[in-house]
Amino acid sequence: MKDEDGCILGVNASGLLIANSGNDLP
């Protein structure tokens, strides 16, 4: 669902970056 960097079609820029921030990042 997410890319290697945790980016999914730029959806992270929509605000999911903060939600997935602690999910993808170590």
Image (spheres, grey):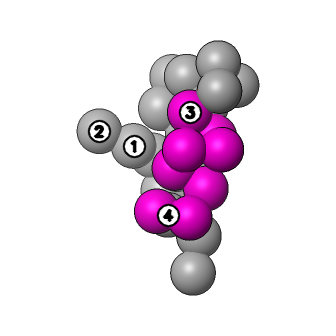
- For label 1, the residue is 2
Q: Which mark is residue 17?
A: none
Percent x, y of residue 21: 61, 56
- For label 3, the residue is 16
Give the main secondary structure of the magenta stretch: helix
Please name the amino acid that badge 1 sits on. Answer: Lys
19 left or right of 17?
Answer: left
Query: Can see residue 24?
Result: yes
N-terminal of the pair, mark 4 or mark 2, is: 2
Could you say whether the residue bearing mark 2 is in a helix, strand or loop?
loop
- For label 2, the residue is 1
Percent x, y of residue 18: 65, 44
- Up-down: is 16 above or below 19? above
Magenta span: 16-23
Could you say whether the residue bearing mark 1 is in a helix, strand or loop?
loop
Q: Residue at the spot x=65%, y=27% of the render?
A: 15
